[in-house]
Amino acid sequence: MKDDAGKVIYVGKAAALRNRVRSYFQSPRGMDPKTRELVAHIRDFETIRTDTATEALILENELIKKHLPKYNVMLKDSKTYPYLKITEEEWPRIILTRRILDDGGRYFGPYTSAGSAYKTLNLLNRLFPYRKCEKKITGHDEVCLYYHMHQCTAPCIAAVDRPTYMEAVDRAALFLDGRGDEILAPLRDEMDQAADAWNFERAAELRDRIGAVEHVLERQKVVSPNGTNADILAVAQGAGGDAGVQAAFLRNGKVLGSEFFPMRALVEDSPEQIIAGFVSQFYGDAAMVPPLLLLQHPLPADEEIVIAEWLRERRGGKVEVQVPKRGEKRDLVAMVAKSAVQNLEQSRLKFLTDEQRRAAAMSELADALDLPRLPRRIECYDISNTQGTNPVASMVVFEEGRPAKKEYRRFGIKTVQGSNDFAMMAEVIKRRFKRATPAATADGDGDGGKPDAKWATLPDLVIVDGGKGQLGAALAALEEVGMADQPIAGLAKENEELFLPLRSLPVMLPRDAQSLYLVQQIRDEAHRFAVTFHRQRRSKAALRSTLDDVPGVGPKKKQALIRAFGSVKGIREASETELTAVDGITPALAAQIKATL
């Protein structure tokens, strides 16, 4: 599909071309929002015929990579991922490569970053020294520094014979394939033989190598006692349309690695569409297709058969695609899904650390809310309580789009009884901005004649967590302290709506806007900070007991009694003699405790 400038905006495939194309140009009533938007921009289309459905899928992937169409789901990073390759040479090397060729080499991966691939490469070189140089091996060369550093067995000077060298390379392959347990027994035998021959230096070297292998194997989580080989895929989607797929690689029952792949998607794209796009693009370049794929969501019905057949062709054997509903496999998918959510959040935070994008987010927010200046300082307020008990509030500050944690403040609610979030928000806003007025002293009371220096810097934008009610309460508080012109907005959680003073309709930031990501991050940070403070207050209140009413029992004696008897019930059941055995408890105090309890 092409727009009026001739740019490709969507690439698809269809077994029945007439039906597929016609579906775009019928009544838009049954279309999802993404398809309606796509159709509105279509001005032309062209078709390419293939002989089989799998050829169509392969061609679709190639065209997506070439044209990067706006309305296709695709891997966000278009580069090829790094792999480790054991070369097909007389004296093989293990190298990093981004190209998979039919050259007899053995490939392992992929890795989402060259850094993680190099880290594995260096570990392999310490465990199973292999040559790093590309020169032709004659056996009569000069030895290099790697030999003296114990990072090469030096076939260049004939210091090792080929069977011994190949044994080390094969062990490295086993290690990369998740079969590290098979390495240990031969290494232990070799160590024992070296010790029996009084070659203690070699025995010590092998001992250290065994220890290093065991250390790595301990970190590889055994999740399937059946020795399953599978890839586990789960999707995470953010409110703004950002998405990603977490892929865990299970080999011989052990999770060898788990990588997060950011995806370019629209907010309307379903998890099924995202996972289908990932499978068809990722395994098009992968060195290996496993016999089993465990998915969090099923493939779309119209693509399931084509993708399954294509995977079998890529593997050259049977490939099962399952969406487990119970048991061990379901637990594995749930574990990977949890990682997907965490990594998507980390990806969002990393996205906002870029200075240019932070500036763009602030500029978008200023335009959307008609702010008089760029919101370089944003304060966000949130209330936290449990049915009106232990109510607290948080104030978090973002400066230049980043958290300014030294500026964070916490409030204990003083004047509001019961569960009244509006009144609590009004109290907090009044207390904060009163301290910035000339009538404030350091504690915010009385007539100090100048503002409190710690509170004097005013924000370019205030965000209160909540809708029209919280916004109205905050506005009344600002008017009361003479700051009615302070820019302010209320953020409703359900639909991410921003309510503004004197406007009946809310502002809806675009789902994929950087300004929305920034607002969400600020709101989430305010909520986290408020909830943490509330838990602290609640825990402190829960520690209060009838012991606090006993004259002469302070915090230290209270802790000593709890340690000795476990609870107030245990103290109540103890005798006065047992109580006096506790350090600091006199007979008179023991009698007082018994009488009170």
Image (cartoon, grey):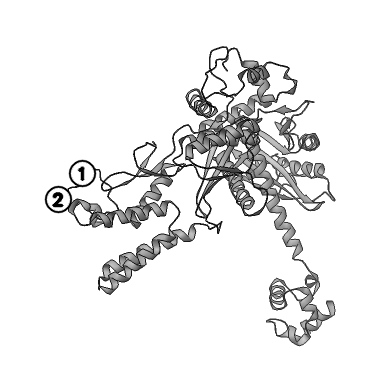
Kind of residue at disc 2: His
Residue 223 lies in what quarter of the image? bottom right
15 or 595, which lies in front?
15
Q: Name the residue located 76 percent from the left edge and 63 percent from the top edge.
A: 542
* Picture layout, residue 169 above or below residue 36: below
The N terminus is located in which quarter? top right
Which residue position holds label 1?
Answer: 136
Asked whether, in this view, residue 135 is left or right of residue 446, the answer is: left
**Image disc number at residue 140:** 2
Residue 10 lies in what quarter of the image? top right
Q: Position of residue 311 (x, y in %)?
A: 52, 37
Q: Is residue 452 visible?
A: no
* Picture layout, residue 402 above or below residue 582: above
Q: Name the residue located 62 percent from the left edge and 36 percent from the top edge.
A: 299
Q: Position of residue 138 (x, y in %)?
A: 17, 48
Categorize mark 1 by other alpha carbons within 10 Å: few (<14), some (14-19), many (20+): few
Residue 70 lies in what quarter of the image? top right
Tell me the element at label 2: loop
**CA distance for labels 1 and 2:** 11 Å
The C terminus is located in which quarter? bottom right
Q: Position of residue 56 (x, y in %)?
A: 53, 26
Q: Is residue 69 visible?
A: yes
* Picture layout, residue 132 above or below residue 487: below
